[in-house]
Amino acid sequence: MYVDALFRHLDIKEFRDLDEEDPLEVEASKFNLNYIKLDGNVGCMVNGAGLAMSTMDIIQYAGGSPANFLDVGGGANEEQVKNAMRIILSDPNVKGVLINIFGGIMWCDIIATGVVKALKEIGCTIPVVVRLEGTNVEEGKAILKSSGLAVIPADGMKDAAEKIIAAVAKGEN
């Protein structure tokens, strides 16, 4: 359920039935994250609905299938990013994660720090591909590279999609 304007409509808010929503969507809403569960096996973390749509399209174009739409938005903090990763990884259908961030308002170093914290705390045995571009991109890439984690860097959306699809296919063989 998209809840951005519900604070203006308290009369409608009381009709929200959490039992009718996907538990992961409810969990994401607790952290002001937008999450929609889908049927695929590639988890997606993005910032912005347009980037989410194009990321899901390019995953399909590369031969994969998106498992979710998870938008951290433009003002996410490390804790929100960490919870976004936790939510994505809690879906048993997810066999790989593509993080595709364009740092305009959202800074790439904040995303990278949140991802590193999440992967270290949660642990992750599936491939994670990260494509960062924009504000503080070099800092973000350095954080990921020095983390000691097996995060796969990507240059551009096509490269990211191809890498996650190949990594997921390799893991399923």
Image (cartoon, helix red, strand yellow):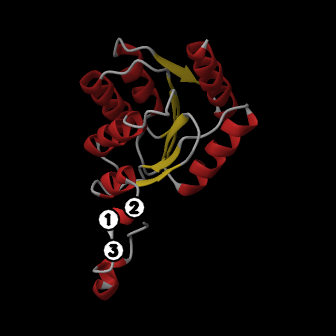
* Viewer-side residue, 95 vs 19: 19
Q: Is residue 128 visible?
A: yes
Residue beneath disc 1: 18
Question: Looking at the picture, how far across and down is residue 28, in whole percent?
Answer: 34, 52
Labels 1 and 3 touching (C-beta < 8 A): yes
Q: Nearer the viewer, residue 116 or 41?
A: 41
> Residue at position x 46%, y 27% from top?
138
Question: Dividing the image into 4 quarters, which one contains the N terminus?
Answer: bottom left
Tag 2 residue = 21
On screen, residue 18 above or below 64: below
Marks 2 and 1: CB-CB under 8 Å? yes
Seen as rendered, the residue at the extreme front is: 19
Q: Position of residue 37 (x, y in %)?
A: 49, 49
Q: Residues within 10 Å of mark 3 (few under 14, many from 20)?
A: few
Query: What's the residue at 58%, 17% (across, down)?
Result: 172
Q: Earlier in the sequence, mark 3 or mark 2?
A: 3
Residue type at numbered disc 1: Leu
For label 3, the residue is 16
Identify the element where label 3 is drawn: loop
* SS for callout 1: helix
- Residues 24 and 28: in front is 24
